[in-house]
Amino acid sequence: MTSEFQQQKEFYWKTRDELLRKYRGKWVSIAQNKIAAVAESLTDALKIAYENTNAKIMYINKVGEEDKVMRKRIRRYNMESDVCDCMAVAVAYLMRRR
């Protein structure tokens, strides 16, 4: 059985051509098998997606820059302080910007 995170990741890659056309250079969050948020920053993509879906598992990547990102599991996220500390979320994040 495929994990929920893996399902979200597969959805991202199945729709990547469309994402490239519409959202190149933006952070896109996939939750509940749909595009849950598009934002300029990882933090905003996470926050908006959570506000839209309350999903605890999501896949986030920067469209067109996937080779610069890696998967990280963030254990918790506090919406009020933008500190990851109160819910389980799986995300991709930018390793380096060089």
Image (cartoon, rainbow, N blue to C red):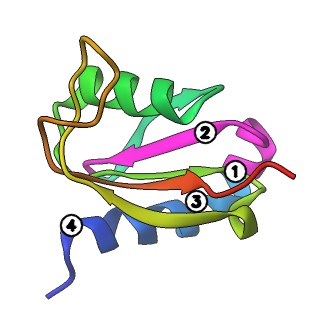
12 lies above or below 24:
below
Relative depth, front residue between 10 and 83: 83
Q: What residue is at 43 percent from the left and 67 percent from the top?
A: 9
Vertical relation: 13 (above or below) 29: below
In the picture, measured across the screen, residue 38 lies left or right of residue 58, that is right
Q: Earlier in the sequence, mark 1 or mark 3?
A: 3
**Mark drawn on residue 63:** 1
> Looking at the image, is 98 positioned above or below residue 3?
above
Question: Nearer the viewer's eye, disc 1 or disc 3?
Answer: 1
Amino acid at the residue labelled 1: Val
C-alpha gap between disc 1 and disc 4 = 20 Å
Q: Earlier in the sequence, mark 4 or mark 3?
A: 4
Mark 4 lies on residue: 4
Q: Nearer the viewer, mark 2 or mark 3?
A: 2
- Residue marked by disc 2: 27
Circle 4 Cα neighbour tier, 10 Å, few/some/many (<14 / 14–19 / ≥20): some
Which residue is most to the top? 80
> Which residues make up the magenta segment?
19-32
Q: Amino acid at mark 4?
A: Glu
3D distance between C-alphas at marks 2 and 1? 6 Å
| Mark 3: few/some/many CA within 10 Å (<14, 14-19, 20+) | few
Q: Position of residue 13 (x, y in %)?
A: 56, 68
Circle 2 SS class: strand
Q: Do the CB atoms of the residues marked 1 and 4 lie less than 8 Å apart?
A: no
